[in-house]
Amino acid sequence: MSKKILITGGAGFIGSHVVRLIVNKYHEYEVYNIDLLTYAGNLENLTDIENRSNYTFIKGDITDEVFIRKLFRKYKFDSVIHLAAESHVDRSISDPLAFAKTNILGTMVLLNAFKELWQDKWENKLFYHISTDEVYGTLGETGLFTETTSYDPNSPYSASKASSDHFVRAYGETYGLPYVISNCSNNYGGNQFPEKLIPLFINNIIKNKALPVYGDGKYTRDWLYVVDHAIAIDLIFHKGKNEETYNIGGFNEWQNINLIKLLCLQMDEKLGRDKGESEKLITYVKDRPGHDLRYAIDASKISKELGWKPSVTFEEGLSKTIDWYLDNEGWMKRIVSGEYEKYYKKQYK
Ligand code: NAD
Ligand code: TYD
């Protein structure tokens, strides 16, 4: 069956992988990608599929109510895959209001336009909201986040995502709007903006710049290769049950400092440096305020119900990721000029 899908934030990191997968796999679907092209949005992420006949890019702001309403009336999207967001915790600490606007208001504007367009004609319609494991707050040394873990967000980023998740559920309960939500752990891979740990450190290693480790480096994250997240999103979009939440994770916990040491080793090898060379760049810096100690996902529901599991080990995924950044130095060069420089100086002064 054909579909008319609106993907939001498709020029960003995860969004571009999702757009690529859906456009390449489902030739009969019409895929519309709306993105404001903020500092994090980059059409260079999609050059390989930009001329496909089943793909249309629309530059626009999800918080612009009038524009979004018109867009829904014009194209009559039957499904939404919503990824557009402000996504970086450190930026949410310096500018929390921007996160409330895009992540909460933007989600509501989309929900409202979708509700107004279809009223009660909900058959074969779906609003798929992409969220994060950070809504659950922090774990101690043990335990895993499940789909029933209570929300307990600690950063303005995670609070804004938690709020958007609640609004999606509320529209389901109140108006019968069909939805599904997934909460994923930390992603890594090609096309990620170099403000997040892995691409920032890859870029700094190449340039022989300090690697700024927050606090004691003993914070733990559960890492998933971005292509595996896109595959999970495709599965949930097609097979997920209405009004359900699915946790997605890599079964792959790493303390930051151990991950950084592995990254340094792989980089030494690929750059032909002596073993231990890149590790010398590690510099401990002031901790992030409200830094969550540990995230870890129990992904058994998506695994049992939909048959999903990660396709690569972390060592393989990390190696592919480094190769992507080494093969795409022009991409990085164009990003780290201008605004990025100002951000970097302010964040790591
Ligand atoms: P990203 O910052 O790389 O991309 C976000 C995209 O949204 C950008 O292209 C940006 O231009 C666009 N955007 C921002 N504001 C907009 C607006 N007002 N209107 C239209 N477009 C706008 O983020 P990402 O890492 O790809 O994350 C995508 C989604 O996945 C987010 O909802 C995020 O919360 C969620 N998520 C991310 C991770 C992760 O590790 N990166 C993990 C779990 C969930
Ligand atoms: P990040 O990639 O920002 O993702 P998140 O905060 O959403 O988990 O950070 C991953 C981990 O790496 C987190 O514990 C913070 C830490 N970190 C550093 O130690 N130094 C850095 O420069 C950055 C960006 C992150």
Image: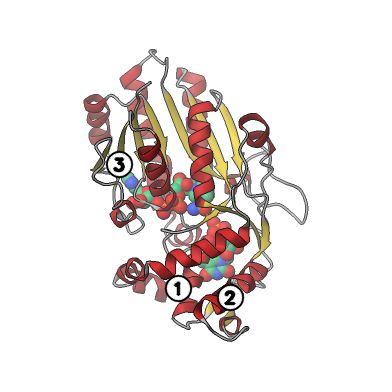
Relative vertical location of residue 74 with respect to residue 86 in this rendering, above or below: above
Q: Are the residues at dot 2 and dot 1 in contact (C-beta closer than 8 Å)?
A: no
Among the 4 quarters of the image, the one containing residue 8: top left
Q: Is residue 334 left or right of residue 306?
A: left
Q: Which mark sits nearer the N-terminus, 3 or 1?
A: 3
Residue named by callout 3: 34
Q: Is residue 100 left or right of residue 260?
A: left
Q: CA distance from mark 2 to mark 1?
A: 11 Å
Q: Nearer the viewer, residue 256 or 251?
A: 251
Residue that appears at 37% across and 40% down: 24
Mark 3 vs mark 2, foreground winner is: 2
Identify the element where label 3 is drawn: strand
Residue on which disc 1 sits:
203
Name the colouring of the figure: secondary structure
Q: Is residue 1 above or below residue 42?
A: above
Check disc 3 and give the amino acid type: Ile
Q: Earlier in the sequence, mark 2 or mark 1?
A: 1
Q: Mark 2 and mark 3 in contact (Cβ < 8 Å)?
A: no
The amino acid sitting under disc 1 is: Asn
Cα separation, mark 3 vs mark 2, equals 37 Å
Residue at 46 percent across and 78 percent down: it is 206
Q: Which residue is mark 2?
A: 264
* Quadrant into which the N terminus falls: top left
